[in-house]
């Protein structure tokens, strides 16, 4: 373990932190973590994890068979999990506590798509502060693919000091030219390695990928000691909603490693090895030319403080942001209006979600995310 990024177990501040966890309830952003477990990155940036290899996200659009497309979407989805849930401990030696975005905060990024003139563009926006909710829209220049979603987290701490997190929200993947859409539900997770001082994420329960063509995939997650002996394990099954007992495809493996998708004759139809696929980092404008609401610009000084371990600077700069946010909310209240979200609209009900979710009995919880967030139709990225 990298001793520079993770504390020695038993160090005073870590022990203090562990103790503080036991008395914490609800909103994770209110947890005061010791400096070495703070990340200089805001949660609005995490939306970029949906893109690991841009080619994998656009790939299904050029497959003509709907069943094969469903397999390609499943492959893409599983391939994003490593980035979403384990890239931080890989890069920084442990999971870290992200900066808590302010209302209206933006993270805008792009990825060129290899071998094409097209690029994927991301608009991620903090659409709610209480509770914290981030929405995102990712689409390519030719509008062959569109991934849009929103999420918030509900955290709780068990008696054994395990932090468990339920995600609220979902993602919708669309291939507009094919008139096809997919619902993607979000995994529950918990933090392991807390007592030893090197926290990391383990996924729990299951998620669905449901296609408007009727193909449904269920991905079940299990950590060490359950179904399989290795951590980050999953199994996945695909069927058609008209014959749910007939398993068409199955996959199992580790979401942090390579995996294979097999048909009912155990013939491999798709495989993925994270070590062999390109993994371009998103292109983000220089801080100087960013909008003041853009994450890296707004948090620049706080991030500097976090990187230097200068908690006075962090505290001072955070207070400046919080104070200006308080002023904004106060003015809005006085003027009887609310903050205008730049890229997203709030719905009470989303018919696209309802139709797909009914296949797997999922329900939206708009009361927990201040609504259902969908990309504004007219807003060009
Ligand atoms: C945010 C949405 C992304 C997937 C994702 C991955 C990791 C999660 C993160 C979400 C939310 C915040 C999170 C993080 C892991 C740890 C962190 C739960 C769901 C908490 C706030 C940190 C707690 C502090 C410990 C490190 C001690 O698509």
Image (cartoon, grey):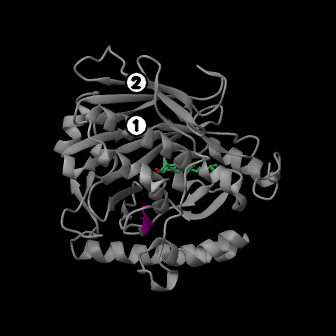
Is 81 a magenta residue? no
Work out how far the residue at label 1 is from the one at label 2, CA to CA, in angstroms.
Answer: 10 Å
Classify residue 312 as left or right of residue 8.
left
Give the mark, 1 or 2, whose residue is nearer the N terminus: 1
Residue occupying the point 60% across, 38% down: 257
Which quadrant is home to the C terminus? bottom left
- Magenta stretch, main secondary structure class: strand
Residue occupying the point 22% across, 20% down: 242
In the image, is residue 380 above or below residue 230? below
Q: Are marks 1 and 2 in contact (CB under 8 Å)?
A: yes
Q: Residue 74 carries which label?
A: 1
Classify residue 213 as left or right of residue 134.
left
Residue occupying the point 73% across, 40% down: 195
- Would you call the spot at circle 1 few (<14 residues within 10 Å), some (14-19), or many (20 or more)? many
User: Hey, which residue is sitting farthest front in the picture?
Assistant: 115
Query: Quick check: can you spot residue 172?
Result: no
Residue occupying the point 32% across, 38% down: 69
Q: Where is residue 198 in the image (x, y as percent from the top left)?
A: 72, 46
Q: Which of 221 and 192 is in front in this view?
A: 221
Q: Where is residue 62 in the image (x, y as percent from the top left)?
A: 30, 48
The local secondary structure at tag 1 comes to helix
Q: Mark 2 points at which residue?
A: 249
Q: Where is residue 252 in the image (x, y as percent from the top left)?
A: 53, 26
Query: Quick check: can you spot residue 202?
Result: yes
Q: Give the range drawn in magenta.
A: 108-113
């Amino acid at each position: 373990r990298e001793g520079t990024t993770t504390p020695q177990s038993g160090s005073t501040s870590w022990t203090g932190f562990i103790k503080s966890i036991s008395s914490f309830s609800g909103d994770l952003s209110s947890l005061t973590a010791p400096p070495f477990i703070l990340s200089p990155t805001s949660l609005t940036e995490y939306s970029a994890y949906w893109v690991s290899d841009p080619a994998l996200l656009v790939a299904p659009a050029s497959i003509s068979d709907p069943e094969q497309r469903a397999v390609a979407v499943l492959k893409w989805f599983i391939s994003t999990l490593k980035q979403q849930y384990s890239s931080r401990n890989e890069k920084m030696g442990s999971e870290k506590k992200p900066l808590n975005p302010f209302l209206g905060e933006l993270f805008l990024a792009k990825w060129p798509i290899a071998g094409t003139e097209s690029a994927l563009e991301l608009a991620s926006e903090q659409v709610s502060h209480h509770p914290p909710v981030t929405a995102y829209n990712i689409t390519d220049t030719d509008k062959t693919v569109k991934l849009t979603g929103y999420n918030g987290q509900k955290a709780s701490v068990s008696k054994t000091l395990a932090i468990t997190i339920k995600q609220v929200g979902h993602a919708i993947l669309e291939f507009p030219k094919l008139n096809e859409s997919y619902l993607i539900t979000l995994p529950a997770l918990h933090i392991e390695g807390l007592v030893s001082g090197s926290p990391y994420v383990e996924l729990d329960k299951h998620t669905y990928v449901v296609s408007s063509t009727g193909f449904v995939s269920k991905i079940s997650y299990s950590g060490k000691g359950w179904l399989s002996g290795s951590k980050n394990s999953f199994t996945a099954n695909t069927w058609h909603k008209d014959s749910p007992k007939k398993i068409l495809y199955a996959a199992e493996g580790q979401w942090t490693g390579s995996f294979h998708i097999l048909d009912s004759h155990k013939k491999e139809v798709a495989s993925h090895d994270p070590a062999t696929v390109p993994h371009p980092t998103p292109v983000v404008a220089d801080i100087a030319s960013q909008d003041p609401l853009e994450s890296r610009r707004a948090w620049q000084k706080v991030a500097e403080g976090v990187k230097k371990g200068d908690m006075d600077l962090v505290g001072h700069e955070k207070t400046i942001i919080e104070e200006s946010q308080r002023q904004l909310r106060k003015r809005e209240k006085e003027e009887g209006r609310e903050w205008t979200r730049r890229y997203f609209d709030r719905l009470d009900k989303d018919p696209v979600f309802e139709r797909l979710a009914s296949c797997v009995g999922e329900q939206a919880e708009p009361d927990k995310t201040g609504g259902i967030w969908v990309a504004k139709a007219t807003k060009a990225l």
